[in-house]
Image (cartoon, rainbow, N blue to C red):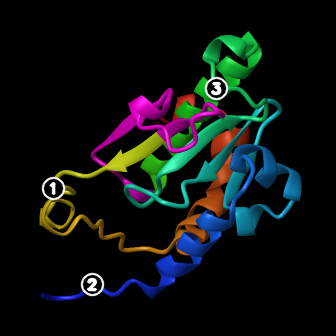
Amino acid sequence: MKQLWAPWRMQYIEKASSVTGCIFCEKPGQKCDEENLILYRGLLAFVILNAFPYSNGHLLVAPYEHTADLNDLQPAALLEMMDLTRRSINLLTRTFHPDGFNVGINMGRAAGAGIADHIHLHIVPRWNGDTNFMPVLADARVLPESLQQTYRRLLPIAGIAYEGDERSNG
């Protein structure tokens, strides 16, 4: 049997097992955005890199309000989440040039939510041919770039993507 070495993953495994509260409530309050991989802070919601991504550039959009139910959010928070989703797609398109996206919300454990008590939206860039034998045969994903590299790659244009109007830029 061949081994796939990914020693950088250990810090995320250890960090995840030590989390006791809600990461979507705790991380924005810590004010160390680079360490916490927070890419953008809006008024009612924020954008963060997924610490356990499906693919490079996997972003999460979460409201600051702690709720598991979309019905509990004010319309302004829902609108901001969708606007941040649109802007995130534009940012990822400019940076990574994916062939498509998976965008969605896993509501409840039965639906696959890893953090079921705080609603959040996933934005996963996809490329033609990005599904290969590794997830099927080895139950492993191969990510060619570290989270810190992805963060540093996205951050310089995040301000433009989230603050400016991307609609005119496609």
**For residue 7, above or below residue 139:** below
Q: CA distance from mark 2 to mark 1?
A: 21 Å
Residue 31 in the image, given as x and y percentages of width and height: 87, 59
- Label 1 sits on what residue type? Gly
Pointer 2 residue: 4
Q: Nearer the viewer, mark 2 or mark 1?
A: 2
Pointer 1 residue: 129
| Numbered disc 2: secondary structure | loop
Residue 84 in the image, given as x and y percentages of width and height: 62, 34
The residue located at (57%, 35%) in the rendering is: 116
- Label 3 sits on what residue type? Ala
Query: Can the viewer see residue 138?
Result: yes
The residue located at (72%, 46%) in the rendering is: 22
N-term mark: 3 or 2? 2
Number of the label disc, if any, that sits on residue 67 = none
- Label 2 sits on what residue type? Leu
Pointer 3 residue: 68
- Label 3 Cα crowd, 10 Å radius (few <14 / some 14-19 / many 20+): some
In the picture, measured across the screen, residue 98 lies left or right of residue 139, that is: right
**For residue 48, above or below residue 1:** above
**For residue 139, above or below residue 161:** below
Q: CA distance from mark 3 to mark 1?
A: 34 Å
N-term mark: 2 or 1? 2
Q: Nearer the viewer, residue 96 or 103?
A: 103
- Residues at marks 2 and 1 touching, judged by CB atoms closer than 8 Å: no
Residue 133 in the image, given as x and y percentages of width and height: 12, 64
| Numbered disc 1: secondary structure | loop
Residue 28 in the image, given as x and y percentages of width and height: 81, 50
Q: CA distance from mark 3 to mark 2?
A: 36 Å
Stretch of the chain drawn in magenta: 96-122
- Residues at marks 3 and 1 touching, judged by CB atoms closer than 8 Å: no
